[in-house]
Structures are given as C-alpha cells and as structure tokens.
Image (tube, helix red, strand yellow):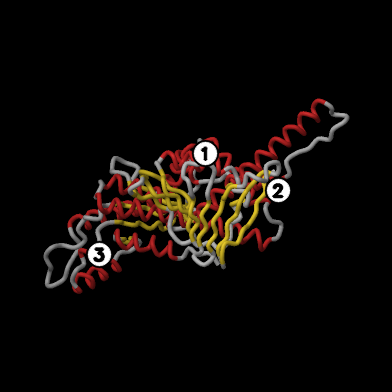
Amino acid sequence: MKKSEIIEKSDGVYEIFAYDDETPEKKHLVYKINKNKKQIIFIPDEEFTVNKVTLEGFENLPPEFSKAGYIKGGLMYYLPKKLGENKITDFIISKTDKSRIRKIKSGNKLVLNYLDFSYLKAQLTSISNEAKQERSITVDKFFYQTYPRRYKKKFLSKKSMAKKAIRNLSPEIIEDISSEDVSHILDFIETLLKSKYKSEIHKRKLFSTAKIRIDDIAISEIIKKFDQMLKEDPSENKWGSFLKRNLYLIDSKYVHALPELNVVLANTRKADFGLIDSHGYLDIFEIKKPTTKILSSRTDRGNYYWSKEATMAIVQAEKYLYHAERKAPSLTEDIDVQRNKKVQVIKPRAFVILGSTKELDERNKQQDFRILRMSLKNIEIVLYDELLKRIKNQKGKIYID
C-alpha cells in the first residue's frame, strides 16, 4: 500500500515523499510545495511523458492529486499519451491562465487551466462509476437469471437512468442522430410536457418556457434567412415560397397556408398564396420583389403616385378580391374539396408585399406614400423592411418571466 511523508524544509516550503509499505526505505520525492509562491512541483514516475508538472496558484494539493504521487481518475494513463502526441516538454496546470499550447526551445509548452483539468477528471470519474454500476447490474442480472429462486431481480434505479441519459446529452451527437431518433426524442418531449408536473402552475410554466424557446429559435432562423435573401435578391417565386412558409409563423392568427390559390377560377394567373386565420377567414397575398418601385419617378402637380409595377400589383389584388367575393361559394367548395381545408370567404383582405422604405428618401415621398396607402380599401401594402422589422419586434416580445 502506498503511503506518504511530509517534510517541512523551511517556512512555507514542504516536500512530500511516497513509499511502499513493504519497502519504506525506498522513499522518493513526489511533490515540492512552496506556499509563499503558490506553486507546487509534481514529480511523476519515469513512465510519465514529462519529468515534472507545475501547478501554479496552489498552496495545497488539489483533490485530483494523491499524496502518494499520482493523479486520480486514470489521468496518469491518459495524460502522457496526449502530451506525447504534441511533444510536450513543459506541462503547467494553472488557476489563472487559459488553456493553450505554444512552442518553446525544448519542444512545446502546454498550459491547462485548472477548471478544464478538473472537468476532465470529473468526466473520467463519472464514466468509471457508470462502468462499475453497469458491471454490477450485469452480475446481478446473470445470477438472477441463473438462480431465480435464490437471487432477487435488480434494476437500475430511475434516478440513475435519468442521470445517465442527461449526462450523455451533448451537441456533438446531433449530426449522428437519425430521423427516427429525432421522432423518438420529440415523442419523449411530448410525454415530458404532459406528465412532468401535476401542479397547474408548474405545468403552465413548463409549457410557456418550451414554447418561448421554440419560437425564439424559429423566428431567429427566419430573420437570418430574410437578411440573406435581401442581399441575394432572388426571384419573386422564391420570395413567395419563403413568405408562404413563414408568414403564418410570424403572425399567430394564421393557421393554414394555401399555395398558388386559384381565386379567379379561369385562365388568369393564380394568387401567390392565401392564408387562413384561426377563425377560418381567408387573406390573399400578392408578392413582388424588394426592388420593385413603389412610386413613380415623376410627380403630377407636385404629387407622387403609384409606379407602373405597384399599380399592376394593386389592380391584380383588387381583381382577386372582386372574384373571391363574387364566387365565394365556388371558391369555398374548391378549397374544401381540393385542399381539405374549411374556409370562410367573407370580405377577404389582400396583402401586397413589395419595395423598401429606402426608396422613400424624401419627406414628400413619405407623405404621399402614406396617403396612397391609406386610400386603398381592403388592400394593405407591406414593404419588405417593414415586414422584417415586424419579425424582429416579434422576437423582441419573446422573453422568460
């Protein structure tokens, strides 16, 4: 059995020797401790890659080091291998410095921050304890199956199972999780939300927190993609596809999307898409590009008016509304039969998404645009940067109480 002996050399300076019970005469120096300098020199055995390990910022041995002259948790086996891979000649464990490696004359110097070091040790200990438990359970299971009348059936406790599952969760495994695994995880989350708490207060808080986190991720992704598309300037079709997929996430009143909605029920082009709100009412969307001009280049008697492109989009939206109301029963039935969606076509609204406030670079343009916009009946003009601002404001509402 390994033992140790502490010898005081001077005030605040100590040496620790290790020896075997059977051969006490063969003592060897394993630690030099200088409390004044807050420094400890660990002198490992000859099989260790470096001939000393310097501990900076320590007056006493940290719990990861044994007085008998070794590092606990199996690190005496693993550390030399990793140090050898990078030809480390100077190894320092520091309470203050960051973990880093740099070249020196004799080879390479490795500084390992003490928090990182203790984390590694804790991980190895956890794995070791888990392995011991697994071995114990395996033995218990074997004897129960072999001698069922003599040995009791033993299982891993639910608490141990929970700790094991949580301990194995890591972002590193995400790329190797299959679609079936994702489905299983979502099923588990659903069960967790349903059954974790009996208290209504705790349940409501859990639901709220889960929804807030999911909404935050979803809206952040939409904002990121929106910004990217504004830079790339894709086609109207791509903008239509993007907005059709995401507008109902932005505005919580919408619950269903209807792509390429045939409002006119003739050979006229279809509306880009429709959205159905939670009450079953239909809104129609006409999508142009962010670069589409809003106002004419010239004024009429000092007043700005709609550009040719904006006028065409507004006229098209008015046609959609006219035909949607005129043929409401046919449209309702068509959506019900072909899309399997119940909808009420009663005083629908049309939204035309186009242009950007960058064009409104004069006060007169801003005022005339506001007047033109307000003059429209059942049609709302939405500019792309206004829409993006709405999305960002929606994200700003997300918080945890």
Residue in the foreground of this view, choosing between 26 and 302: 26
Residue 299 vs 266, above or below: the answer is: below
The picture places residue 116, in percent across and down from the top left corner, at 50, 53
Of labels 3 and 2, earlier in sequence is 2
The furthest residue to the front? 25
* Mark 3 to mark 2 CA distance (whole Å): 58 Å
Look at label 1 and name its amino acid.
Glu
Q: Are marks 2 and 1 in contact (CB under 8 Å)?
A: no
Residue 310, image x and y in percent? Answer: 22, 57
Badge 1 or badge 3: first in the primary sequence: 1
Of helix, strand and loop, which one carries label 3?
helix
Disc 2 to disc 1, how far (Cα)?
Answer: 40 Å
* The C terminus sits in image quarter: bottom right
Q: Element under label 2?
A: helix
Of all residues, the one furthest to the right in this rendering is 149
Q: Nearer the viewer, mark 1 or mark 3?
A: 1
Please indicate, yes or no, whether residue 155 appears anywhere in the rendered image.
yes
Picture coordinates of residue 308, whole percent (x, y): 17, 56
Q: Which residue is mark 3?
A: 357
Image coords of residue 80 (percent x, y): 49, 41
Residue at image x 62%, y 60%? 204
Q: 372 or 217, which is in the foreground?
A: 217
Q: Are marks 1 and 3 in contact (CB under 8 Å)?
A: no
In the rendered image of this protein, does residue 299 appear above or below residue 17?
A: below
In this image, 136 relative to 85: left or right?
A: right
Give the residue type that dot 3 points to: Thr
| Mark sitting on residue 159 | 2
* Other-residue count near label 1 (Cα within 10 Å), few / some / many at <14 / 14–19 / ≥20: few
The residue tagged 1 is: 47
State the residue at coordinates (25%, 49%).
Answer: 232
Give left or right: position of 57 versus 314: right
At mark 1, the secondary structure is loop
